[in-house]
Amino acid sequence: MKKILILLSLLLAACHQPDGVVNVTGGRIQGFPSGKADVTVFKGVRYAAAPVGELRWKAPQPVEPWEGILVCDQFGPIAWQSGNAPGTFYGDEFYWNGTPEMNEDCLFLNIWAPTRTLGQTDAALPVALWIHGGAFQNGYGYEVTMDGDEWAARGVILVTLNYRLGTFGFLSHPELTAEQGQSGNYGLMDQIAALKWVRDNIAAFGGNPENITVFGQSAGAMSVKDLLISPESRGLMAKAIIQSGGGLGTRGLAPASGIPQSFYDRQGKDIMDNAGLGTLADMRSASAQQIFDTAGKYMAAGKGFVMLSPHNDGKVLTETFDEAVFDGSLAQVPILIGYNKDDMGMLAGASVDRFCAVRDSLGCPVYEYEFLRELPTDEEHPASAAGAFHSAELWYMFGTLDNSWRPFTAADHALSARMVDAWTSFCRSGNPGWPAYKHDKPYKELFDIE
């Protein structure tokens, strides 16, 4: 009888578990209804331990378990960054609502999932993991354009994340290399840790860990390209979407060929020495503000321009994207790739076309698009009439037009629905709804209002 009573009490406890509660690595978390019917959002879910103190400039570590239910109703702090000030183009376009709290403790992700599938580990919904842009110096996973309501309403679980940026995310140094075997690429390691967290936990939200699409824009798209070639992320993604991140022959923030780790170590040592941080102990005991200021002080001293980003370190990245395309080590997954009409230089046009042609010739499915819609403006924002500019598609692709000051029309909302349908279709099946690119019969889907 005693065993029966214990069993009944456990069953009753399970029946009375609060709505929106799921079990993940570390303990239980509770999400809350979003603004969309049958969608629950989990904000500020920790996917790795705080990278502070002795964990500064180390690979992300597992989360510490907690007691009880962790309430996930607030987004987590964002990585240290300069941000985009009001009065600048992007400041007025995307960041007019101010900069959220910044903290070195920034390794959080956010999940939008259909309420009906929470706890249904056999629901097997497609999953999309979004990596934000910002030149590896700025940005976060819940910018005003980024919301998962429309995706979850279509049965695709959307996950967004923060990762370490700038000096915190990509500094190399001889002492770090001696300690770890390589250094730098910590922000990329964060992305891989988040991808592994999703693989290990997404079934609790009704997701399929075998059907994860990784996608991003600008530096986020370059990150996707890095994840497609990294030995550390092999087998973790089923599909990829590259938005305004270039194709073949892309330079700039992309890892370069033939530059040894020692070059990046010397650069990092020069930056830290210039700030008076001569040892690793000094570097780890310095305040976050001191570390954030180091790159600016280095440039102000006339020692050269510096913008830290992913590089080939011999472990996380072992070759360039172009090399991986041609030697066959690029992940063999369907890829959706494209750009905006008024995009930045090599991030658009011929470099993407070349990638599509080569990718198809190697027998791998690839789909190309171009975003053509010149965004509408009004009399209060005449300087913002900048066409189909870099990042303009984000309003449409996430279905967040209502978050913008721009006077979008019914035609814009129809275009947005078409794009959300295409992106979620690709996540679901590997086909966005138009013909694949063929090197002998190229096809590019065009997105504009009708």
Image: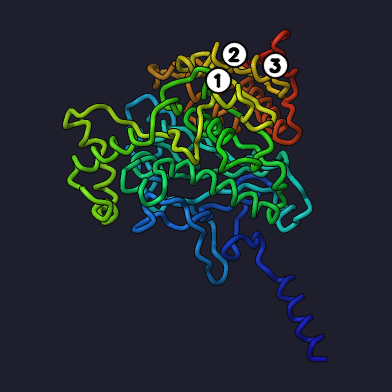
Q: Residues within 10 Å of mark 2 (few under 14, many from 20)?
A: some
Left or right, 441 with reference to 311:
right
x, y percent for residue 15: 74, 70
Asked whether the beta carbons under mark 3 and mark 1 sit within 8 Å of each other, the answer is no
Residue position for label 3: 361
> Which residue matches tag 2?
354
Taking depth in this image into account, of 235 and 334 the one nearest to the observer is 235
Label 1 amino acid?
Gly
Q: Quadrant of residue 29?
A: bottom right
Q: Residues within 10 Å of mark 3 (few under 14, many from 20)?
A: some
Q: CA distance from mark 3 to mark 2?
A: 11 Å
For the C terminus, the quadrant is top right
Disc assigned to residue 436: none
Counting residues from the start of the chain, the first of labels 3 and 2 encountered is 2
Kindly identify the residue that appears in the image at 45 percent across and 19 percent down.
Answer: 378
User: Please, is residue 422 above or below residue 14 in the view?
Assistant: above
Per the image, the residue denoted by label 1 is: 247
Three-letter amino acid code at disc 3?
Answer: Ser
Say left or right for 341 vs 313: right
